[in-house]
Image: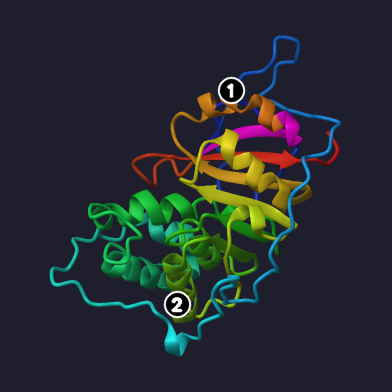
């Protein structure tokens, strides 16, 4: 079972994108004047702050940057030297098949590449290969059922491709735009996209503030706290679209600290889902909320 609920859900009316058991919801703190529910809503009549001019969108499997032309695969600066000492890699858990289904072989190839080359390329730390499946790959993959069918999804601060490339593997019907400002990382993302033959990925070298939307959903993992993450991601979402962030154990504190920012950017119906119970040692905490739209 991928997810479970801790209390009833009567406030959002959403339907799950998979037939797996529903996730556990953590009730968020509500204002004293609001009705009791499993979610906390923030609604503001004001429009979100205006944004400065954005950079053009990238084409599939390409990298865009003002100070650097697109680099072809033949001239890619990514150097993949085999490590002198092979990393100790976590054995593939049985949960991988449940998460990736017939896309498991692609997930295996990506995991193997990241385990072998991730540390030398500065994508993961020296201890991460030993827990790559459970802490990173499956941790990201359990979010896949929460992408809308055929959704245009932006992954902000994609880095090693977590969760962006993992979601692109698990959900070939969705189109993922991986937004990353660092050249070394976008080189890796582009190269890995081509190696895996993913035709539903666009790699964009840019800051989130300079990217072009709108997207149906925007995701992020280990980027920053909500109070700084929402201002650079909410403007990328279409009216009525969603923010879906993978967060840590202190997400409730982040929500409280970001209450004014959430109202300012018209972020409402926020909830925290706990995914992957029984599949990974620590559940994935997914912050999910709607931007704008009808309340």
Viewer-proximal residue, 46 or 196? 46
- For the view shown, which residue lies furthest in the left direction? 85
Residue designated by label 1:
256
- For the view shown, which residue lies furthest in the front direction? 67
Q: Is residue 243 visible?
A: no
The structure residue drawn at horizontal position 69% and vertical position 45%, both measured from the top left corner, is: 234
Provide the secondary structure element on which disc 2 rests: helix
Magenta-span inclusion, residue 268: yes
Where residue 226 appears, as percent x and y from the top left, is: 57, 36
Q: Is residue 163 above or below residue 71?
A: above
State the image quarter where residue 105 is shown. bottom left
Q: Is residue 237 visible?
A: yes
Q: Is residue 9 above or below residue 233?
A: above
Which one is earlier in the sequence, the residue at label 1 or at label 2? Answer: 2
The structure residue drawn at horizontal position 51% and vertical position 24%, both measured from the top left corner, is: 253
Q: Residues within 10 Å of mark 1 (few under 14, many from 20)?
A: some
Residue designated by label 2:
191
Type of secondary structure dominating the magenta stretch: strand
């Amino acid at each position: 079972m991928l997810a479970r609920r801790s209390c009833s859900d009567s406030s959002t009316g959403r339907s799950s994108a998979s037939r797996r058991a529903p996730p556990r919801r953590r009730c968020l703190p509500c204002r004293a004047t609001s009705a009791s529910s499993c979610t906390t809503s923030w609604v503001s009549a004001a429009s979100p702050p205006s944004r400065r001019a954005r950079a053009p969108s990238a084409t599939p499997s390409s990298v865009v940057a003002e100070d650097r032309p697109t680099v072809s695969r033949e001239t890619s600066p990514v150097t993949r030297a085999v490590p002198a000492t092979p990393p100790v890699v976590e054995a593939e858990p049985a949960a991988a098949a449940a998460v990736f289904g017939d896309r498991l072989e692609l997930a295996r190839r990506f995991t193997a590449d990241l385990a072998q080359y991730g540390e030398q390329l500065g994508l993961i730390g020296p201890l991460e290969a030993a827990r790559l499946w459970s802490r990173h790959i499956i941790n990201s993959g359990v979010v896949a059922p929460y992408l809308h069918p055929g959704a245009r999804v932006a992954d902000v601060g994609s880095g090693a491709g977590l969760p962006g490339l993992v979601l692109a593997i698990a959900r070939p019907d969705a189109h993922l735009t991986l937004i990353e400002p660092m050249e070394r990382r976008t080189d890796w993302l582009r190269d890995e996209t081509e190696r895996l033959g993913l035709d539903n990925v666009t790699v964009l070298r840019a800051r989130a503030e300079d990217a072009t939307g709108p997207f149906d959903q925007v995701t992020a993992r280990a980027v920053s706290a909500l109070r700084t993450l929402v201002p650079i991601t909410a403007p990328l979402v279409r009216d009525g679209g969603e923010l879906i962030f993978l967060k840590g154990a202190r997400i409730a504190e982040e929500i409280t600290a970001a209450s004014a920012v959430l109202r300012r950017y018209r972020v409402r119906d926020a909830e925290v889902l706990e995914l992957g119970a029984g599949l990974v040692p620590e559940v994935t905490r997914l912050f999910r909320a709607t931007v704008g739209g009808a309340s």
